[in-house]
Amino acid sequence: MKRRLAVVLLATSLGSTSQVRAAIGPERAGADARTFLSGSAARFCSAPPSRLGPDALRLCPLADVAGCEPLARACAAAAAAPPEVSNKSGNFDWVAAIFGRFARAALWLMFGGLAAFAIALAIAAFRRARTDRALADARPQASAASVAGPAAAADADEPDAARLLGRAEALREAGRHEHALYIFLQAALAALDARRAIRLASGRTYGEYVRECREPSAREPLRELVREVDRVKFGGAAATSVASGLAAERAGRLVRAAATLAALTLALAACGSHERPRRTASEPAGTEVLEELLSRQGVTAGPLVGSLARLPMPSPGADADRAVLVDLERTPIDGPTALHLMEWAREGGVLVLLGRTDLWPAALGATSAASASLEVNTSMEVARDGDDEPSDADEPRASSVRYAGRLAAPAALSMDCGPFAASSPDENTLAWTGDGVAFASFCAVGAGAVLGVASDDLFTNIGLMHPGNAEVAFAIVARSHASDVRIAQPMDGIAPPSSPVASLARAGLGVGMWHALAASFLLFWAAGVRLSRAAEAQQTPRRAFVEHVEATGFLYARAGASGHALTAFARFAVERLRAAMPRAASGPVAFLAQRSGTPFEECDRICAAATNPPNPMATAAENLAELRRLTALYVRAMRRAAP
Amino acid sequence: MARAVVGQQELLVGACVALVAGGHVLVEGAPGLGKTLVARALAAVSGCAFKRIQFTPDLMPSDITGSSVFDRQTSELRFVAGPVFTQMLLADEINRAPAKTQSALLEAMQDRTVTEGGTSRALPEPFVVIATQNPVESQGTYPLPEAQLDRFLLKLTVGDPPREQEHAIVKNQLLGFDPGKLELSAVTTPAELLEMQQHARSVRMDDAIIAYLVELVRRTRDDRAIELGASPRASLALMRAAQVVAASDGRDFVTPDDVQPMAAAVLRHRIMLHPDAQLQGISADDRIAEIVRVVAVPRAQG
């Protein structure tokens, strides 16, 4: 009697009994696990890594499986010689610290150098673009367009070689051999361009196409075709039916080569995609076995593509049987991701969470519970074998089957499903530990569900190999109703940065980024100054003499020689007045009096006092007052003397 | 010629094109790159009479064209022809002579006549001037005036030979090659050259090709990096050069492939770059290459 297991979901949590849409069968999972273990793909058992990682070490208690002796030996060896946390380098910590500082400085330098290099490139590109824009002839010439004519447009508008070939054939049959000839050439060029054997450009000649053609076999027919077209187009020769026939044959050969190549590529692709390459599992804590067993049950299983934080919201009806499995021990999630996952579940997604409850989204209200048992139990109602004629109509058609597995370490949970709970979690316990504490629970969340498991032990490669574990794991997964299970990868739990700036800031390069921005600004500013149009140099006032006078004044002031300062300035003033006065002027004093509008006697007195040797009896205040008077006169006179 | 000259394909081809097109060639390159050797070899294989003038600062126009001297016996002025009366003239280091002497070649190059004492005398046919100049030296040189530059059909630049070619040059000398004694036999005659020139002029040029080459030349006048673009004489020169290239390929019609390779040689000495462009290191060849790249090539349209 043929037996067929039909898994029936005890969906008491949903208030109704419904059949599991994906044919997930715990019994079959167990059988598949045993088959997998006996095959060569279970390399984590037969050839485990020489140094087991912490996750693998955590699962070592499950390695006591027949067929997994190498792993058990590796676990024993690791337990006998625990990894040394060497403290030998303690004496050289200061060396490490110094090198660390150097390394950090070198990293910053490298980053700065890279930034500067990129900026330099940008500046060079900017300059080049500016030069090109200034120098290039931006005005398209109408005559050039007329020279190129519709042919250039045809190159761009009709890239379909097969269509061009058909059009050329039609023209040839209509007796328009010249036009047919031209279109044959266009078809051949389009085909070669599509195959990237040539690159069409308006400034390239047919000869260039022939010379640059990367398909040696196509070069000769193309050369002949071009020769014939040139003979007709530029040589004024008449296009004959023979010529167009030869062109048709050559162009056809060139175009069909593309089709053949495409067909060959498709065939190779089809051959290559015949069967999915069998995956091998080499890491005891991996999830390859889970994927494989799910696939063998007809469930679409594979790694999640993209971040959990960008998981698209389930569309009603379309994603109803899709579940996402997140092993929080391997895939820690951050706050935004947790929020998005809960929103995703509420919108109709089915989320399967594995691992310690402290890693779960807080909104689920999951806490770890005390349990000392390694045993884990679950039960499912499984349909009885499908006899054609039921013997007794009153006999129940499904029977409850109990499965038992073993954990590497005790784990239990308590989940109240938080504010999202649509039903009491106590009624939704899916699996229990040996001491009766919940191990896996189910929460109806909005339109979706969250299925929480206190430990990922059962779902790891080695965990699934342990007798009974695959059955328990698949009995739990069966509650997800999923026919498409996507498994999150270790890096999927971190929300991708919203921008490159956020990415840099998250990588701890925020300060460096600001430094680079500042450097960029400075570099752009410097380059901009250099690139700016040369401006007319402004006439700056001559400062040298003024500075000299000021310096001399300070010297006299420090020396307390105000008399000498007065005398020096008076000599200077007289000399300048002499230079400025007209020939008819009787002298600088008269000139000063006339120009400054001051009585001659007054000017004479001031000049005499100034030009005579310093009066040792005069105080500094008197000398300075005299100097100011002379200066005022001088300035007034020179202003009026100026043209 | 390949027996005498190693490499320098562009120079050889350009010189041959100019010879068949009946134009003159200006060769620019550093000393010792074989410019003179190419000219002599070309003269030898073409069967043309060859003369060479070494241009110097004290060279006088009459040293080129010739002059009338008093003949005591006949008591008349007798014209003594200068070295310009030849079929192939090598004007070596032409920029070392002052403008007045350089201009003595103007009439000879354009009209193929020499006027002296009010009498014009025709030069022998064919008449080709191959002038050389050194781009490096500036002391004691006189740049050619634009009017004279325009008379040259092509300006060819000579670069350093690749390592293999230089190796072959040295090895040839060791094996007894003497550049002073070219043992080359003529493969044609001046009369045949004239026939070739006639044939080249008869090569068909489609209107689309004419429009294309005119567009190439006109673009040099609109280019902002070019202060002074090429004259219509450049269009004529480009047409003649393309005709020769087409004929040398055995065709009796010109295609865009015949025009493009000659564009640089025809145009590079006919354009004057803007000072800003020169300061930015842009060369005439760069701009010409860009123009050739952007101007749409005439195509067969269906």
Image: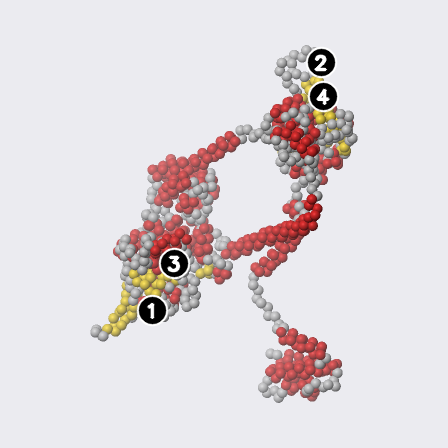
Closer to the camera in the image, A571 or A320? A571
Chain containing the residue with disc 1: B
Nearer the viewer's eye, disc 2 or disc 4?
Answer: 4
* Kind of residue at disc 4: Arg
Q: Secondary structure at mark 3?
A: loop
* Kind of residue at disc 1: Pro
**Mark 3–mark 2 contact, CB under 8 Å?**
no
Residue A402 numbered tag: 4
Q: Position of residue A572 (x, y in %)?
A: 64, 81
- Location of residue B42 by image quarter: bottom left
B36 to A237, vertically: above or below:
below
The residue under label 1 is B61
Q: Is B247 left, or right, of A163 in this rendering?
A: left
The residue under label 2 is A395
Q: Quadrant of the C terminus of chain A?
A: bottom right
Closer to the camera in the image, B64 or A130? B64
Q: Secondary structure at mark 4?
A: strand
Q: CA distance from mark 1 to mark 2?
A: 130 Å
Establish whether labels 1 and 2 are both on one chain: no
**Mark 2–mark 4 contact, CB under 8 Å?**
no
Q: CA distance from mark 3 to mark 1?
A: 28 Å
